[in-house]
Amino acid sequence: MTILWSLDPRVSETYRFALGGGVAVLTHAPHITKAVDESADQHLVVIGLDIGVDPACELAERLRVDRPEVGVLLLRQRIDVNVLAQALRSGIREVVQSDDQTTLADAVRRSEQLTAQLVGEGAGRGDRESHGRIITVFSAKGSVGKTTLSTNIAAHLAASGARTLLVDLDLMFGDVAISLQLVPAGTVSDLVGMRGHLDRAGLESVVATHEQTGLDVIAPSSDPADAERVPADVILELLRTARTHYTYVVVDTPPSFTEHVLTALDVSDLTLLVATLDIPAVKNLRLAINTLDTLGASKDSRVIVLNRSGIKVGLDVDEVETALKQSVSVSIPNDLGVPKAANRGYPIVVQDQRNPAAVAMRELADQEVRARFGEPVEQGPRRGFGRRRSRA
């Protein structure tokens, strides 16, 4: 199967001679990344005329790191020397004139031959590393319990035996470390010096481990000014490196679409969108969903979480779903035990397993994360807190 990146879903007919019949036309880069991630047999991406050179090169650079055996070809109306140089630097294998189908067919054949060599070498070395899952927790409004949710989900995943990393991407005011009473030896800012060559040893040099659960944490600098010194490509490199060494990478985020957040969302396998029973939170989440739709983010990889549910404030779950035009997958009840546990530095999912909020958060992690990605999960009795909802 060949992926053709174009804004015109009918363009596959134009290139049927060169590409054959097995062509999937995708319109957004995140969809292409997801399709490549989910299929080990996906080996060719052809980028159409209506896609800019810069986004084309960005995709090629990502694939060169994550899936070097995947060939990328770029179609242009005419071949400009500057475009050709930029394309080849980014990892695009060839730039082809869009009206020359014979040359395109030859380029496809050469790409397939190179891919076969790379796949063969990789199989001989057995060096295809595991592909961990990235779960980003986001809300467009602060004070909805996003960090508490991130911390508890990550702690439960780690306590369940999965190698788990929690990345605090609120680079100015992150609270993950203090919530777990950790004193990190290194921070995200220290990764800037490893830019372009971050490896496992570099990653481990900035990790702090929560002894009770085995959860690894990467925290931001205590100086908010350092946030501006961390480029988005460092975050991208961090997440790509982390997913090769961890089963799960949970990303806690600030309540805004910063460049760092957009980078995390772009490579995430699952996005947990958090709201509470108040109009500003619901309104902001609706705007966030609209933004994600505009960016072409996958709707199937989103889970709506209603935190602190059950309180009587004149707004109920049905009204939230109507406003969001999307079902709430999980409701987590309001419980004073949650902030009490956080103040003591212990995730409530491991400190008080019978607590209703802890039950719901564990169910969220088990059903929407572990089971979604094929991990066996023991099916205990459902207590009705982390409920799945569907609307006709």
Image (cartoon, helix red, strand yellow):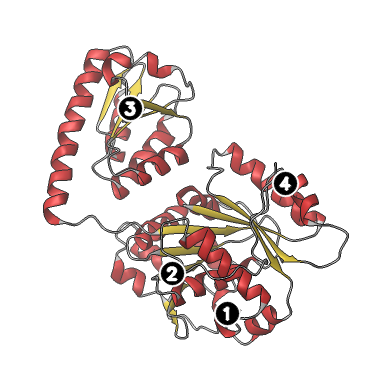
- Specify the quadrant that holds the C terminus: top right
Q: In this orientation, does residue 84 appear? A: yes
Where does label 3 land, which residue?
74
Q: In this orientation, does residue 219 appear? A: no
Q: CA distance from mark 1 to mark 2?
A: 15 Å
Label 4: few (<14), some or many (≥20) within 10 Å?
some
Provide residue 154's location: percent of width, then percent of height: 50, 70
Q: Is residue 242 left or right of residue 17?
A: right
Three-letter residue code for mark 3: Leu
Three-letter residue code for mark 2: Leu
Where does label 2 land, which residue?
165
Q: In front here: 363 or 135?
A: 363
Provide residue 383's location: percent of width, then percent of height: 65, 70
What residue lies at 27% left-to-right and 37% top-to-bottom? 43
Label 1: few (<14), some or many (≥20) within 10 Å?
many
Q: Give the numbered dot on residue 324.
A: 4
Q: Give the numbered dot on residue 88.
A: none
Of labels 3 and 1, earlier in sequence is: 3
State the residue lying farthest toward the front.
381
What residue lies at 71% left-to-right and 43% top-to-bottom? 325
Label 3: few (<14), some or many (≥20) within 10 Å?
many
User: Mark 3 or 1, which is nearer the eye?
Assistant: 1
Three-letter residue code for mark 1: Pro
State the residue lying farthest toward the right.
314
Q: CA distance from mark 2 to mark 3?
A: 36 Å
Q: CA distance from mark 1 to mark 4?
A: 29 Å
Q: Give the numbered dot on residue 347.
A: 1
Three-letter residue code for mark 4: Leu
Q: In front here: 229 or 331?
A: 331
Label 2: few (<14), some or many (≥20) within 10 Å?
many
Under tag 3, what secondary structure? strand
